Image: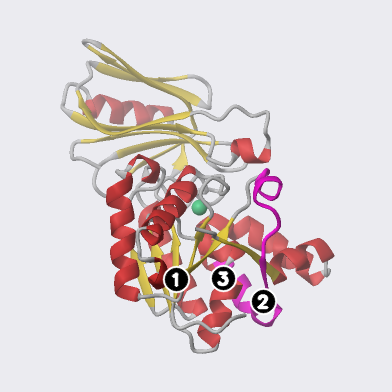
Amino acid sequence: MEKERHVLVVFPHPDDEAFGVSGTIASYTKSGIPVTYACLTLGEMGRNMGNPPFATRETLPQIRKKELQDAADVLGITDLRMLGYRDKTVEFEDEAVLAAHMGSIIEEVKPSLIITFYPGYAVHPDHDATGAAVIKAVKDMPENERPKVHCVAFSNNCEEEIGQADIVNNVSDVADLKLAAIKAHVSQTQLMAAEMEEQLKNQDPAVMARIHNERFWTYKF
Amino acid sequence: MEPVIIDHVQKELDRFAQKKVYIHLETTNGAYASHFNESFFSSGAYIRNALLQYEHGKITGNGPFRVGLKMSFGWVYAEGITHFEVDDKGRLLLAGHDFSGKLAVSLQLSEQPF
Ligand SMILES: [Zn+2]
């Protein structure tokens, strides 16, 4: 992994950082590189409520806020920002205003690398809208001041259209932190995390590869 | 939340009748439904803090339950309700959780905005 000055992670939902990026985040913070995580919503509209349900539509935001903070602590993120948008509404915000908001954070944090979703290839409308706002904000910067942008893509058609990921980070060193970050989002991952741990114990090669390798597409402006 | 007790929910619906109430109404199959199954037609609807007044409300069915609110100029209704709660703010929270426990529908009433 390249040495960075400061990494800015921008995702719309608590737990977006956990599955595909937490190993990369932990690798950075472990080597002393500061990571800022800007999370747009509190995942207020999540469908996982625990089974039997321990969350309600109204308590879920507070529960997920705490889970997000716990995950950030696990990953060594010291600058966690919750931006106050509402889950499933990001795509309906004014695009210019949203991009300007992202731009103001970028200007303040001055990251050498931004990690976000690849617009159009990230399945959830909030993911696409968040990625698009970040890309627009960076595009609006003078070329020589732009940070690198590494995007997460996972739509069924992504490799067909944008090719293979050009960055693959092996995060097996910090796999324990990654699992802990996933587990921190209890309300969303309780069943999945247990299953994943079992598969890891059995050294299921497909699961090992998925957990140990994190893939990114460098955005080309 | 706890599984619907029909008499309890009916009492709560009566309590909010003929008052100005804020409504949260939502149906959802999740944003990933079509990603995991491309033949799945994803749909949903969501309204938060609609202010209205209903003449009477009713819960029916054998579970999952249906809840309808009759207004002087229309209707509000939700299907698939399995759980309820009256929270510490006195709001009536109704939700339907699918077979895997995921929220599929919710109808909530409050005298204050959510
Ligand atoms: Zn997400």
Q: Chain of mark 2?
A: A
Q: Chain of mark 3?
A: A
Distance in Å between CA atoms under marks 2 and 1? 23 Å
Label 3 Cα neighbours within 10 Å, binned few <14 / some 14-19 / many ≥20:
many
The amino acid on which the numbered mark 2 sits, given as a three-letter code, is Val
Who's the residue at 42% across and 45% down the image? A45
Residue position for label 2: A171
Q: Determine if the C-beta at disc 1 is less than 8 A from ligand 1.
A: no
In front of the other: label 2 or label 1? 1
Which sits in the foreground, A31 or B8?
A31
Which sits in the foreground, B110 or A146?
A146
Q: Earlier in the sequence, mark 3 or mark 1?
A: 3
The answer to whether residue B99 of the structure is visible from this angle is no
Residue A7: image location, x then y, percent:
46, 75
Residue A162: image location, x then y, percent:
65, 51
Distance in Å between CA atoms under marks 2 and 3? 9 Å
| Region rendered in magenta | A156-183
By secondary structure, the bulk of the magenta-drawn segment is best described as: helix
Examine the image and state in which quarter residue B39 appears.
Answer: top right
Label 1 Cα neighbours within 10 Å, binned few <14 / some 14-19 / many ≥20:
some
Which sits in the foreground, A127 or A201?
A127
Who's the residue at 55% across and 79% down the image? A26
Residue position for label 3: A22
Distance in Å between CA atoms under marks 3 and 1? 20 Å
Residue position for label 1: A147
The amino acid on which the numbered mark 1 sits, given as a three-letter code, is Pro
Q: Does residue B13 lie above or below A142 as drawn?
A: above
